[in-house]
Image (cartoon, helix red, strand yellow):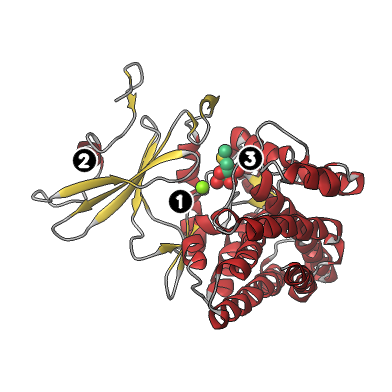
């Protein structure tokens, strides 16, 4: 057990956590039979589940480590991110009426939080990898997006109040990770990349030497860095979403900051698209494969169209901006711009998840080597089209032909 005697911080583990939880919250019965398991498989933190075996009552404890877990102590990272994350969760809980876990206790000394366990939910990426469909998903996630993004923006908030929030949620170290790992390193032969050797010449040919593409990527990076528009989740991939047959809960907003609305939408779209790529290669049951692909196509289209409609509807009715009330056409331009940039950002996320430091199972777990390779190459080409053609993407239907083109090409190769 590592202890920093000066400030009372120590690393939690299964031998000390039961005592820790009982001193912080009055949640378990006095005769509880509590067991602990370490369940964290993310890149950054320690995560534990503590359960009373007698009645199944449980909580989750998340503690920040002072370095990047997936790299080690050579990449130090502020542990104050845990306080920031719990602040965001509290805000998002309020804004969405409970679409994120409830925080029971936030500990500024241990850089840990104790929160609601979502044991009746599964991680959405794992459920999608098992070819499960969730027809209600797009409706729920676009509610989450509109409630957390529109309602923390200048459309609704008073200017001073919004700027206070911008200040409170400044998150330079985690933003730097995104600036480096999403918008920079995958676009040259960087040391941090995790790239199969056969992909190097492919990347040189299609991405690293394409000045027009790089010009768009740098624009998107500066858009990400200089656009304090709304309080983002900041890492809204399918591993940050818990889902069951009727509901979703969004977790892990530690990359949250005031940034462009398009970022959350783009990351989400990218991860749905990569699952679409994955099912094509991993599902041997044709009926199930088609069913899953049809679901994903609708989900991708609906995320864009429902976001667009809900954003327009609530912005029109709820905005405090007098000039927008008189000139509603402005809103159409505004949302067009969000969707186009989301398409470009989706492309960057797809490229980084293929050759950057942190991959996704959707691509990595395609077992057959030739199929794995084809999917990764096609994913890069599709991502490139999304970045180059982003200004033509305004509605759900604009993105779907790109997926079909990609798929037909792949089928020809097999
Ligand atoms: C080194 S951290 C890598 C990635 O993990 C997180 O989930 C974020 O997506 C980050 O970019
Ligand atoms: Mg995470």
Marks 1 and 3, how far apart at CA:
35 Å
Which residue in the protein does label 2 denote? 18
User: For the residue labelled by badge 3, is the local secondary structure a helix, a strand or a loop?
Assistant: loop
User: For the residue labelled by badge 1, is the local secondary structure a helix, a strand or a loop?
Assistant: helix
Residue occupying image coordinates x 69% and y 41%? 197
Quadrant placement of the C terminus: bottom right
Answer above or below: position of 234 versus 141.
above
Marks 1 and 2, how far apart at CA:
24 Å
Q: Residue 255, can we see it?
A: no
Which residue in the protein does label 3 denote? 194
Q: From the viewer's side, name the closer residue of 210 and 89.
A: 210
Answer above or below: position of 314 versus 382.
below
Give the class, few, some or many, for how many residues have Cα within 10 Å of label 1's Cα (few <14, many ≥20).
some
Which residue in the protein does label 1 denote? 90
Residue occupying image coordinates x 84% and y 65%? 333
Quadrant placement of the N terminus: top left
Q: Earlier in the sequence, mark 1 or mark 2?
A: 2
Q: Is residue 247 left or right of residue 37?
A: right
Callout count: 3
Whole-percent x and y of residue 193? 66, 37
Marks 2 and 3, how far apart at CA:
37 Å
Answer above or below: position of 1 versus 389.
above
Q: Earlier in the sequence, mark 2 or mark 3?
A: 2
């Amino acid at each position: 057990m590592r202890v920093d005697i000066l400030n009372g911080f120590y690393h939690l583990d299964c031998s000390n956590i039961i005592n820790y939880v009982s001193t912080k919250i009055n949640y378990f019965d006095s005769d509880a039979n509590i067991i602990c398991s370490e369940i964290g498989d993310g890149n950054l933190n320690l995560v534990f589940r503590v359960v009373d075996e007698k009645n199944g009552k449980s909580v989750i404890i998340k503690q920040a480590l002072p370095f990047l877990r997936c790299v080690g102590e050579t990449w130090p990272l502020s542990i104050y991110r845990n306080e920031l994350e719990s602040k965001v969760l509290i805000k998002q809980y309020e804004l969405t009426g409970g679409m994120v876990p409830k925080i029971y206790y936030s500990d500024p000394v241990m850089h840990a939080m104790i929160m609601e366990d979502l044991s009746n939910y599964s991680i959405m990426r794992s459920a999608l990898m098992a070819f499960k469909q969730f027809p209600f998903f797009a409706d729920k996630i676009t509610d989450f997006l509109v409630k957390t993004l529109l309602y923390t923006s200048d459309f609704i908030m008073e200017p001073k109040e919004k700027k206070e929030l911008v200040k409170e949620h400044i998150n330079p170290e985690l933003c730097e990770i995104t600036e480096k790992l999403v918008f920079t390193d995958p676009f040259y032969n960087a040391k941090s990349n995790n790239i199969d050797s056969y992909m190097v010449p492919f990347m040189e040919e299609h991405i690293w030497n394409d000045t027009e593409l790089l010009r768009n990527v740098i624009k998107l990076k500066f858009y990400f860095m200089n656009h304090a528009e709304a309080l983002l989740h900041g890492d809204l991939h399918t591993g940050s979403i818990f889902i069951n047959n009727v509901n979703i809960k969004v977790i892990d907003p530690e990359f949250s900051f005031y940034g462009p609305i398009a970022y959350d939408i783009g990351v989400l779209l990218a991860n749905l698209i990569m699952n679409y790529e994955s099912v094509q290669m991993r599902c041997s049951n044709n009926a199930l494969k088609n069913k899953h692909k049809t679901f994903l196509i609708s989900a991708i289209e609906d995320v864009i169209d429902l976001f667009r409609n809900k954003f327009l509807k609530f912005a029109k009715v709820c905005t405090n901006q007098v000039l927008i009330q008189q000139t509603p056409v402005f809103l159409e331009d505004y949302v067009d711009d969000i969707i186009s940039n989301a398409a470009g950002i989706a492309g960057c996320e797809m490229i980084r998840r293929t050759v950057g430091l942190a991959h996704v199972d959707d691509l990595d777990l395609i077992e057959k080597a030739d199929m794995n390779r084809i999917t990764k190459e096609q994913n890069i080409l599709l991502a490139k089209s999304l970045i180059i053609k982003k200004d033509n993407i305004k509605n759900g239907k604009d993105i779907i032909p790109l997926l079909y083109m990609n798929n037909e090409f792949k089928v020809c190769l097999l």
